[in-house]
Image (tube, rainbow, N blue to C red):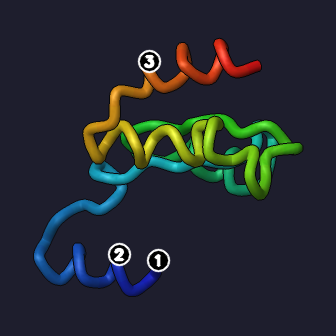
Amino acid sequence: MLEVIAAYRKLKIFFERHAVTMTGVGSKLYNKEKQGDRLAIFPMRGLVGGKTSVMSATGLLPAALKGLNIVKTLKRRRTLL
């Protein structure tokens, strides 16, 4: 991450205005980011991990950015449960 931030700064682009954070509410990172200029902070539950992360913000945000219809995906998932 530090290398990415350095590359943005070299181009005189303020990295924090182009980045989002996914972390647990109340964590050190969450508290730090709340004070910053981050584009958005997506809260994660403490139990997210492994195969369950695909249907959490951790997996759905990148999927949505890639163009996947996450609303449709979540509706389909609900019918499987």
Q: Residue furthest right?
A: 47
Q: Residue at x 66, y 15 (%)?
A: 78
Q: Where does label 1 land, which residue?
A: 1
Give the image location of residue 16, x and y in percent.
36, 55
In the rendered view, does 26 fall on the left or right side of 67?
right
Q: Amino acid at mark 2?
A: Ile
Q: Residue furthest left?
A: 11
Q: Which quadrant would residue 12 be assigned to in this image?
A: bottom left
Give the image location of residue 48, x and y in percent.
79, 45
In this view, the residue in front, 26 or 80, is 80
Does residue 62 sit above or below 70 in this rendering? below
SS for callout 2: helix
Q: Which mark is residue 5?
A: 2
Label 1 neighbourhood size at 10 Å, few (<14), some (14-19), many (20+)?
few
Q: Earlier in the sequence, mark 3 or mark 2?
A: 2
Q: Amino acid at mark 3?
A: Val
Q: Where does label 3 land, which residue?
A: 71
Give the image location of residue 34, x and y in percent.
58, 40
Q: Amino acid at mark 1?
A: Met
Q: Earlier in the sequence, mark 3 or mark 1?
A: 1
Dot in front, 3 or 1: 3
Label 3 neighbourhood size at 10 Å, few (<14), some (14-19), many (20+)?
few
Q: CA–CA distance between discs 1 and 2? A: 6 Å
In this view, the residue in front, 61 or 21, is 61
Q: Which quadrant would residue 6 be assigned to in this image?
A: bottom left
Q: CA–CA distance between discs 3 and 1? A: 30 Å
In this view, the residue in front, 3 or 74, is 74
* Residues tagged 1 and 2 counted as in contact (Cβ below 8 A): yes
In this view, the residue in front, 80 or 60, is 80
